[in-house]
Image (tube, rainbow, N blue to C red):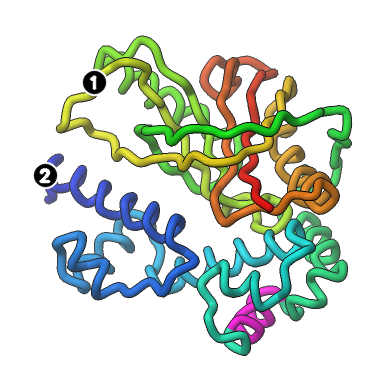
C-alpha cells in the first residue's frame, strides 16, 4: 500500500505533467526529455500518469492538440489551416489533416466551414441537451486588458457538472488548514463544451492566496495561470450559463471581434460561486485569452 507521501508525490507528478502538456502543446513534446526533467524513468512516468488520471500520455497529447485545433479553427478566421496545425504542435500538414479527420470525421476545412455545428448537435443529442439552450450574450461588453501571471493551488477534475461542489469544499478545507483566509477562487476551463463531451472536459478549481505564504509540503499541486491580453466579461447567472458563455465567446464573439485566441485556457474569477457557496446563482469575471 502506498504511503500518503507517495500518493501526494504521484499526484503532483501527474498534475505537473498535465500542466506541462497543455502549456507546451505547440511544441514537439518529447516524453524521454520530460521524464528526465521530472527525475523519473519514462516507464514510471507513464505508470503514474495512468494511475492518477486514468489516461495514456500519448493519447492525452493527441487529444489536447486536436481539441485546441478544433477550437482555433472556429475562432481564428484569419489563420490558415496550416498555421492552426502549427499552433497545436503539428509541424507536418498531412499528419494534422489525417489526425483531425480520424478524430472528428471531417477535414479541418469542412469543420471550419460549418461542420462543427453538425458535430455540436450530434454530441449534445447523444449525451447532454444542456447546451442546446444556447444564450445570447451580445449584451455583455468585454473590457480588453492585460493580466499578470497568477500562482494558484488547485484540484483537477474531469467533467463539467454539479459534482464540482465537492472539489470546492475540499479547497475551502485546505485553505482553512493552511490559514489562507484571503484568496481568489478561480475556475479554469481547459475545453470548449461545444466541442468536447461534458464528461471529458477538464475543469480545474483553484485557490489564489492573497499575501499568504503556503508551506512547501502543501498537499496540493501548484501551477501558474499565464498572464497576457484578455477579453473580460462580467457575468451574473446560474451554473450552466458559464458553459454557454464559453461556447458563445469562442463561436460568436471571437470570430467577429477582430481578435484571435491562443491555446491558453480561459478562466473565471468567482465573486460568488454556487459550487462552493451552495447558491443557485453566481457572479464571476470570465477571462478569455486573446491576440491579434
Q: Is residue 117 above or below residue 6?
A: below
At label 2, counting other C-alpha atoms closer than 10 Å, the crowd grade (few under 14, some 14-19, many 20 or more) is few
**106 displayed left or right of 30:** right
Which residue is label 1 attached to? 213
Instruction: Describe the element under mark 2 as helix, strand or loop.
Output: loop
At label 1, counting other C-alpha atoms closer than 10 Å, the crowd grade (few under 14, some 14-19, many 20 or more) is few
Q: Which residue is pictured at 21% across the width and 72% down the height? A: 42
**106 displayed left or right of 58:** right
Which residue is label 2 attached to? 3
Q: Is residue 190 above or below residue 29?
A: above
Q: Which residue is pictured at 85% across the width and 66% down the height? A: 118
Mark 1 or mark 2, which is nearer the start of the sequence?
2
In terms of depth relative to the viewer, which is nearer, 146 or 55?
146
> Bounds of the magenta span?
96-104
Majority SS type along the magenta span: helix
Q: Quadrant of residue 234?
A: top right
Amino acid at each position: 500500500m502506498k504511503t500518503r507521501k507517495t500518493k501526494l508525490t504521484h499526484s503532483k507528478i501527474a498534475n505537473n505533467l498535465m500542466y506541462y502538456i497543455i502549456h507546451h502543446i505547440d511544441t514537439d513534446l518529447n516524453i524521454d526529455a520530460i521524464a528526465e526533467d521530472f527525475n523519473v524513468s519514462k516507464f514510471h512516468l507513464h505508470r503514474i500518469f495512468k494511475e492518477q488520471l486514468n489516461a495514456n500520455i500519448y493519447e492525452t497529447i493527441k487529444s489536447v492538440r486536436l481539441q485546441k485545433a478544433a477550437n482555433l479553427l472556429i475562432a481564428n478566421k484569419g489563420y490558415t489551416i496550416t498555421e492552426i496545425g502549427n499552433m497545436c504542435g503539428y509541424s507536418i500538414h498531412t499528419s494534422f489533416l489525417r489526425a483531425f479527420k480520424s478524430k472528428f470525421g471531417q477535414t479541418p476545412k469542412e469543420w471550419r466551414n460549418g461542420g462543427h455545428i453538425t458535430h455540436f448537435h450530434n454530441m449534445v443529442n447523444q449525451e447532454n441537451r444542456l447546451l442546446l439552450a444556447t444564450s445570447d450574450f451580445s449584451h455583455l461588453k468585454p473590457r480588453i486588458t492585460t493580466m499578470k501571471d497568477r500562482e494558484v493551488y488547485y484540484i483537477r477534475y474531469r467533467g463539467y457538472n454539479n459534482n464540482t461542489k465537492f472539489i470546492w469544499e475540499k479547497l475551502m478545507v485546505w485553505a482553512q488548514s493552511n490559514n489562507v483566509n484571503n484568496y481568489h477562487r478561480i475556475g479554469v476551463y481547459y475545453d470548449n463544451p461545444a466541442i468536447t463531451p461534458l464528461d471529458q472536459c477538464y475543469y480545474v478549481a483553484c485557490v489564489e492566496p492573497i499575501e499568504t505564504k503556503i508551506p512547501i509540503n502543501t498537499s496540493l499541486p501548484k501551477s501558474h495561470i499565464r498572464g497576457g491580453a484578455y477579453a473580460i466579461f462580467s457575468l451574473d447567472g446560474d451554473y450552466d450559463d458559464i458553459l454557454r458563455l464559453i461556447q458563445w465567446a469562442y463561436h460568436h464573439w471571437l470570430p467577429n471581434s477582430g481578435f484571435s485566441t491562443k491555446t491558453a485556457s480561459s478562466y473565471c474569477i468567482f465573486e460568488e460561486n454556487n459550487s462552493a457557496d451552495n447558491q443557485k446563482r453566481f457572479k464571476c469575471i470570465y477571462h478569455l485569452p486573446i491576440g491579434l
